[in-house]
Image (spheres, helix red, strand yellow):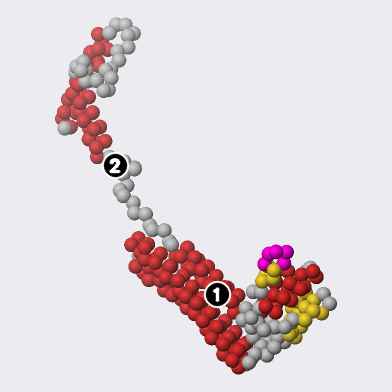
Amino acid sequence: MALLFRRGAALAARSFRAAAASSSSTTVHRLPAAGSVAGAGEFAPARLFILENRRGFAKGKKSKDDRGDTVQAAPDIGPTVKSAASSQMDAAVIALSRELSKLRSGRASPGMLDHIMVETAGTKVALNRIAVVSVLDSHTLSVMPYDPASMKSIEHAIISSPLGINPTPDGNRIIAAIPPLTKENIQALCKVVTKSAEDFKQGIRRARQKALDTIKKSASGMPKDDVKRLEKEIEELTKKFIKTADDMCKAKEKEISGS
């Protein structure tokens, strides 16, 4: 290869000197185009050698874009799954709290009247939206309507509720005395608390199962350690909310029994 290159170069040099010597004018002789071999005469061997070397170099050179296939990491679904599960479980606990507040206990509580619907101006509205309920003492509630004209409707709604309260008008407000619960009432209410707790804990467990199903669908694109860690975090989250629901119900049973 080196010998061929030297011969080609020598031939090219001799041809160039001969052409320069024979030319008595200032005419400029242009070399044939780099891509054309035909008509190149003596330059052909050298050109062929140079072209072949260039082609060989181009074949051997790697493109900057030739980096091989890249494996994209799977997105981290952990925060999204935990956030959705936590939100659903929290909603179940809030709903349980509202349900328990409707249950009457031997102690006066403003939340006792929240579920009572009052018919006014042809529509039914929650009592706590048209009146202010406050505690006068441990056995007495005060109901102050925003509109005095709605007093009769509020009084009728309280009497019609299953709370067993007989309110009495007192100027621009209504006084609602909370009678003590009987033993039978206490037992019945505690059963209601237990049932309510179980119903809403089912909502927490459904949120747990939904989260685990989501993790299972995405498990093929996640490391096994990440899957196990995320499942464990969902289980811990479930236990936390279940405990919160149990504690609320125990507190309500204690309130009902008066102990």
State the extent of the magenta-drawn residues as a range: 120-124
Q: Which residue is mark 1?
A: 93
Percent position (x, y) of residue 13?
Answer: 23, 20
- Mark 2 or 1, nearer chain start: 2
Q: Quadrant of the N terminus?
A: top left
Residue 123 forms part of the magenta stretch: yes
Q: Amino acid at mark 1?
A: Val
Q: 34 or 111, which lies in front?
A: 111
Q: Which quadrant of the structure image shows residue 66?
A: top left
Q: Which of label 2 and label 1 is nearer to you?
A: 1
Q: 231 or 51, which lies in front?
A: 231
Residue 225 forms part of the magenta stretch: no
Percent position (x, y) of residue 222?
Answer: 36, 63
Q: 87 or 219, which lies in front?
A: 87
Residue plotted at (51% across, 71% down): 89
Whether residue 79 can be seen here: no
Q: Amino acid at mark 2?
A: Lys
Whether residue 93 can be seen here: yes
Q: Is residue 55 left or right of residue 119?
A: left
- Farthest top residue? 24
Q: Which residue is mark 2?
A: 62
Residue plotted at (51% across, 68% down): 88
